[in-house]
């Protein structure tokens, strides 16, 4: 893997919802095998950018080129209904559907992958519990484990640790660090600048436009951060 190899390339991408443009001519590169943090104030277009990369939100114009054909997408825990009558283990096992399909039995390999991902997020002991009975941190760890179980070369996460306690954040961060070492390309939306500073690559958005891209130390300068968040300098 090299920062010179692009896992995702965006060219003058525009996109939005209900005739409201959110992304305005975004051109950026996500380097292969690296962890890219997407940062910006609320409403900057971070989640929309992730949705475009995932293929959930079509670009109204511009180009999106992905090297990986099947990205794994981890949403925020608050977007998953408490009413779903599904266990933690079954939730993680759904990550194997990309390989097996939803109606085929899991193989021995599939089950081994599920157990490994449960272990990575330290949720094996609660694997029998229903998703709706879990705390926010436990549920988010289950969703991250599901994303890892897909074994995609491109993992997309929308603020996976937002609002979680220290233990949940640490377990998620450790799992993502190990996954990145395995050569997986990770794109992580975060509002936490400390998390972004530990990334390999950073995209800074403001009002749907990319205002800076590159190594976090060069992107997240005091002036740029203040400007992106509209804070007086």
Image (tube, rainbow, N blue to C red):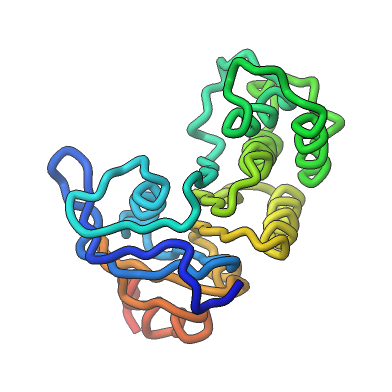
Residue 42: in sight, yes or no?
no
When asked about the image quadrant of residue 40, the answer is bottom left
Residue 26 vertical position relative to residue 42 in the rendered view, above or below: below
Give the total number of marks visible in the rendering.
0
Q: In this view, does 87 lie to the left or right of 215?
A: right
Quadrant location, the N terminus = bottom right
Q: Position of residue 73 (x, y in %)?
A: 51, 43
In the image, taking residue 175 as reference, residue 41 lies left or right, namely left
- Measured as percent of width and height from the top left, residue 85 is found at 63, 13
Residue at 60 percent of width and 15 percent of height: 103
The foreground one among 147 and 8 is 8
Q: Where is residue 178 in the image (x, y as percent from the top left)?
A: 74, 59
Question: Looking at the figure, which quarter contains the C terminus?
Answer: bottom left
Q: In this view, does 168 lie to the left or right of 48?
A: right
User: Is residue 204 or residue 56 the one in the foreground?
Assistant: 56
Say if 40 sits above or below 126 in the image: below
Residue at coordinates 46% horizontally, 58% vertically from top-left? 67
Q: Spot the residue most to the left.
A: 19
Tell which of 56 and 189 is nearer to you: 56
At a point 42% along the width and 47% down the height, the residue shown is 54
Q: Can residue 57 be seen in this view?
A: yes
Residue that appears at 38% across and 85% down: 223
Q: In which quarter of the image is residue 227?
A: bottom left
């Amino acid at each position: 893997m090299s920062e010179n190899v692009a896992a995702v390339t965006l060219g003058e991408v525009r996109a939005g919802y209900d005739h409201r443009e959110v992304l305005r001519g975004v051109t950026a590169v996500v380097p292969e095998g690296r962890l890219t943090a997407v940062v910006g104030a609320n409403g900057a277009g971070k989640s929309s950018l992730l949705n475009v990369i995932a293929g959930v939100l079509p670009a109204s114009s511009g180009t999106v080129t992905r090297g990986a054909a099947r990205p794994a997408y981890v949403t925020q825990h608050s977007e998953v209904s408490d009413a779903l009558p599904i266990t933690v283990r079954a939730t993680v096992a759904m990550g194997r559907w990309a390989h097996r399909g939803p109606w085929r039995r899991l193989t021995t390999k599939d089950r081994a992958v599920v157990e490994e991902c449960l272990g990575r997020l330290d949720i094996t002991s609660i694997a029998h519990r229903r998703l709706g009975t879990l705390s926010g941190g436990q549920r988010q760890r289950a969703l991250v484990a599901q994303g890892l179980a897909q074994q995609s070369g491109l993992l997309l996460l929308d603020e996976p640790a937002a609002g979680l306690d220290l233990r949940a954040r640490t377990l998620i961060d450790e799992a993502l660090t190990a996954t990145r070492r395995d050569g997986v390309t990770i794109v992580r939306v975060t509002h936490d600048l400390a998390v972004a500073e530990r990334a390999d690559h950073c995209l800074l958005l403001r009002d749907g436009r990319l205002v800076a891209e590159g190594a976090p130390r060069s992107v997240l300068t005091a002036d740029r951060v203040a400007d992106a968040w509209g804070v007086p300098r």
